[in-house]
């Protein structure tokens, strides 16, 4: 929840270092002071995270002045930001995998109780891009080595997230069989020559490549062909299907918006029902909770259309409600 610019947490969580003894002299660690106290908004709710600092109890230890803290608490959010890393990952998924706009991402986050503005979404996405670029090369190579051992080679896919109003395009190279992100980079130009500079270091890893996959962008296809002309290339089937289904997806999005507009009075019903304790009021609260759950439903277009899903489930709730009302009016039941 937010009140103006202040986050209100529903719970305070305390974190200690993941080890109880000094890693140098094995003496017990004692609490010394609070390292940080931070309220963050996550996909599960708003929490106040307290990271407690500990020092070695041995005054003669060479690291007696070192303050140890919880690595788990540090990983919950980045510095100077009040949103959890799970929110950053969710924003990245919506933007890169589902190609949602800032406005659409803002709406989805607000539906989950994470209050953001269009400007906040942009900042969160920029932080996600920073995390993506910081992925270690050694980790990617380790994952790719395992893929080669199992499949005798790797398959590389490449895609670019279209910028919004002056932002650079983020290009990501992913290994298809394992889903490993191999490289990510913001580029000012999508010219073939610049994309070749981005792709070449990945090819220089030396892993056998079974094939390339990308959308229909010509500069990506030409970059692959010039760098590795003998490697098979395939147009991404998901992009192909998505392009064909775009008219249906657009209409489905409008359908979801229209259904949600008709459900805007849920809060008023909940307020009225919460003031009484009769069976009818309890049932009304149950139906309101079911409708709220439906509103949060999301799909994976074009294979799973969220608008159709929301429409079908609201119809099921409507039939159930009509059945209950019918029984209420039937004196024989």
Image (cartoon, grey):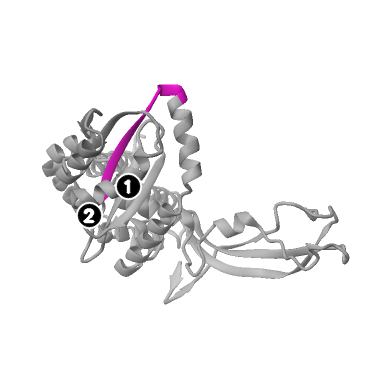
Q: Secondary structure at mark 2?
A: loop
Q: Residue at x 26, y 61 (%)?
A: 168
**Residue 206 drawn at (x, y percent):** 40, 34
**Residue farthest to the bottom?**
4
Q: Residue at x 39, y 65 (%)?
A: 115
- Please tell me which residue lies in front, 164 or 234: 234
The Cα–Cα distance between marks 2 and 1, rounded to whole angstroms, is 12 Å
Residue with the mark numbered 2: 162
Check if residue 158 falls in the magenta segment. yes
Q: Secondary structure at mark 1?
A: strand
User: In screen coordinates, is 60 left or right of 322?
Assistant: right
For the magenta stretch, what is the residue range? 149-161
The answer to whether mark 2 and mark 1 are in CB contact below 8 A is no
Within 10 Å of disc 2 (Cα), the crowding (few <14, some 14-19, many 20+) is: some
- The answer to whether 235 is drawn above or below residue 152 in the figure is below
- The answer to whether 93 is drawn above or below residue 163 in the figure is above
Within 10 Å of disc 1 (Cα), the crowding (few <14, some 14-19, many 20+) is: many
**Residue 48 drawn at (x, y percent):** 58, 65
**Residue 194 drawn at (x, y percent):** 24, 52
- The answer to whether 75 is drawn above or below residue 247 in the figure is below
Q: Is residue 20 visible?
A: yes
Q: Residue at x 42, y 56 (%)?
A: 88
Main SS, magenta region, reads strand
- Please tell me which residue lies in front, 211 or 309: 211
Check if residue 150 falls in the magenta segment. yes
Q: Between disc 2 and disc 1, whose residue precedes?
A: 2
**Residue 93 drawn at (x, y percent):** 35, 49
- Please tell me which residue lies in front, 96 or 84: 96
Residue with the mark numbered 1: 172
- Please identify the quarter of the rendering in which residue 316 is found: top left
**What label does residue 252 carry, if any?**
none
Q: Nearer the viewer, mark 2 or mark 1?
A: 1
């Amino acid at each position: 929840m937010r009140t103006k610019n202040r986050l209100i947490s529903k719970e305070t969580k305390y974190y200690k270092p993941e080890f109880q003894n000094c890693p140098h002299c094995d003496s017990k660690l004692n609490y010394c002071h609070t390292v940080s106290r931070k309220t963050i908004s996550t996909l599960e709710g708003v929490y106040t995270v307290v990271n407690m600092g500990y020092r070695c109890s041995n005054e003669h230890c060479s690291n007696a002045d070192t303050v140890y803290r919880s690595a788990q608490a540090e990983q919950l959010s980045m510095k100077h930001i009040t949103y959890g890393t799970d929110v950053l990952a969710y924003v990245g998924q919506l933007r890169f995998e589902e190609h949602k706009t800032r406005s659409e991402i803002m709406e989805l986050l607000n539906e989950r109780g994470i209050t953001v503005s269009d400007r906040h979404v942009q900042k969160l996405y920029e932080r996600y891009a920073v995390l993506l670029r910081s992925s270690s090369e050694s980790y990617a190579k380790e994952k790719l080595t395992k893929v080669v051992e199992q499949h005798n080679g790797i398959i590389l896919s490449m895609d670019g997230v279209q910028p919004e109003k002056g932002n650079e395009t983020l290009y990501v190279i992913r290994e298809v069989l394992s889903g490993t992100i191999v490289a990510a980079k913001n580029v000012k130009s999508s010219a073939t020559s610049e994309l070749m500079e981005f792709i070449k270091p990945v090819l220089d890893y030396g892993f056998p490549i079974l094939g390339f996959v990308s959308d229909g962008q010509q500069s990506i296809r030409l970059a692959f062909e010039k760098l590795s002309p003998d490697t098979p290339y395939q147009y991404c089937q998901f992009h192909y299907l998505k392009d064909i289904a775009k008219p249906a997806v657009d209409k489905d999005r409008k359908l979801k918006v229209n259904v949600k507009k008709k459900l805007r009075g849920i809060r008023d019903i909940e307020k009225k029902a919460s003031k009484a304790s009769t069976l009818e009021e309890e049932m009304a609260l149950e139906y309101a909770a079911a409708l709220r759950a439906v509103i949060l439903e999301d799909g994976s277009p074009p294979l799973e259309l969220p608008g159709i899903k929301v429409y079908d489930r609201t119809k099921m709730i409507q039939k159930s409600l009509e059945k209950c009302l019918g029984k209420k009016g039937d004196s024989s039941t």
